[in-house]
Amino acid sequence: MTPSGLCHFPLGEQVPASEHAVCVSLPTMTDVVGYETKDPKVINKIPAGYPRFVTHRLISRLINELLLEKGYQDRTGFALASRRAVDDFREFLTPHEIEFEERNGFVLAHAKESPELQKAGKAFLQHTGFSISSRQAEDILVARGVARVQQEEMVEEENASIIARRQIADAMGEEISPENILLATSGANAFHALFRGTRELLADQGRTIWIQLGWLYVDTIKVLSNFSGERVESIAIHNLSDLSELRKLFSDRGSEIAAVVTEVPTNPLFHTCDLDEVRNLCRTNGAMLVADPTMASPRNVKVADHADVIVNSLTKYAANEGDVMLGCLAFPKGSTFQDGWIDGVRRYIAPPYARDLARLAFEMRHYPNLVERTNKNVMALATFLESHSAVKKVHWSYAEPFGANYRNLAGDGKPGCALAFELNGAIEPFYDKIRILKSPSFGTKFSLLCPYVQLAHYDLTQNNQGRNILASAGLSPDLIRVSVGEEQAQEIISVFSEAL
């Protein structure tokens, strides 16, 4: 039975009640700050969390057991999902001396313990999605006779890839065929693989500029900044209401531009660019257009006629029970993406673990219904919030001045499951009071809410320079993002009404 997200959850409670849940409760702003500052009083009560941000206890247990067996009490370990991560991991963690051991289905990396090593290793796995999954760790521990597998509904593993890719193609539209979809351990891993697999190929053609169009998801930003190498230049253009800066860049340096990367709409401000114009600029100048429709779901917003590559986090909407993390790349039939580049991209993709994929394929049966119901709930909630005196501003797919651009790609009545808003007053009283699950992620059957900027960009909120960067992109440190579930619309509105 799917839980309702409309109640108070204690600190650290996993939702759903699954060993593999990706959502964990952070019920107060004090808990949020404690989570970000690694306060032991908070961290010790969080058994898991969003998988790329929190090392799952099963993965930690497996790593610790393997290190202790070898007598390595003073070493820190990491479980890499693929040997394809080894070179980048070693480079990212320089000057730490890393040792690698190939195990059955994963790579154990370890080095002498230090806070700097732990921080760098965690950052690498967060940005690239190269960690093994909790289900893989669970199966290894079961095989070692020290754990029991959690029973859950799923499709037959041998059919899972076919079922999932068919559902993804159906969601994205007729320009996408199942055989042109690459599955990955997460949306972040999919984007990292795309960037790393084409970066040098495009640089060899003199195309060294990657443009970040809009304020994008945190790990997309991090990949473009942390894995650019010596030859690549990453340029951010945050203003999507006026594309004159983008036009000038193409006019001045069009032959140097490798790709434009954008989200449709962006996370968390729900801005949608004029994708027709961006596509035309890219095609005229031979640049690649990379579009990510995750925020509103590719079932709602159709970008296959515009993009050369589509990036999609399947953790949202597709894995609607909230207990699987996966992602994909899709290559439309009209894409200018060259077939010869695919092998380079595959080199950096960490293929999904079989049980994760089987679970995802099972949950995707409910994908169309979830999208239909949450579309209606978000429209009702947006109408309520826009008229409430305590609310300063509501950001959602149809908000001006970007609503027309979004409507051009999605039509009417298809905003997705999420919106964001700012209050006229302080965030803390509202956040602590509201009767809803407070956790990262979105696109689940149950409603949830998070102080997005505090969780994704906490470091920027702590100094004037960082706050100025956020302000220049239109981001308030107190921005609240909401993902509605399948509860009754009036029940959702009632929860917000009592907290406001």
Image (tube, rainbow, N blue to C red):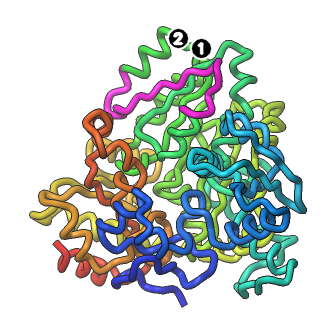
The quarter of the picture where the N terminus appears is: bottom right
Residue assigned mark 2: 253
Badge 2 marks a residue whose secondary structure is helix
Q: On the picture, is 185 further left or further right than 494? A: right
Give the magenta part as a residue range: 225-244
Q: On the picture, is 482 further left or further right than 422? A: right
In the rendered view, tell whether residue 59 sits above or below residue 259: below
Q: Residue furthest top?
A: 252
Q: Mark 1 and mark 2 in contact? Answer it, CB < 8 Å.
A: yes
Between residues 241 and 389, which one lies in front from this camera angle? 389
Specify the quadrant of the image occupied by residue 470: top left
Rounded to the nearest whole Å, what is the CA distance between mark 1 and mark 2? 5 Å
The quarter of the picture where the C terminus appears is: bottom left
Q: Circle 1: is it few (<14), some (14-19), or many (20+) Cα within 10 Å? A: many
On the image, the x and y values in percent for residue 16 come to 53, 81
Q: Amino acid at mark 1?
A: Glu
Badge number at residue 363: none
Residue assigned mark 1: 256
Q: Amino acid at mark 2?
A: Arg
In the rendered view, tell whether residue 54 sits above or below residue 435: above
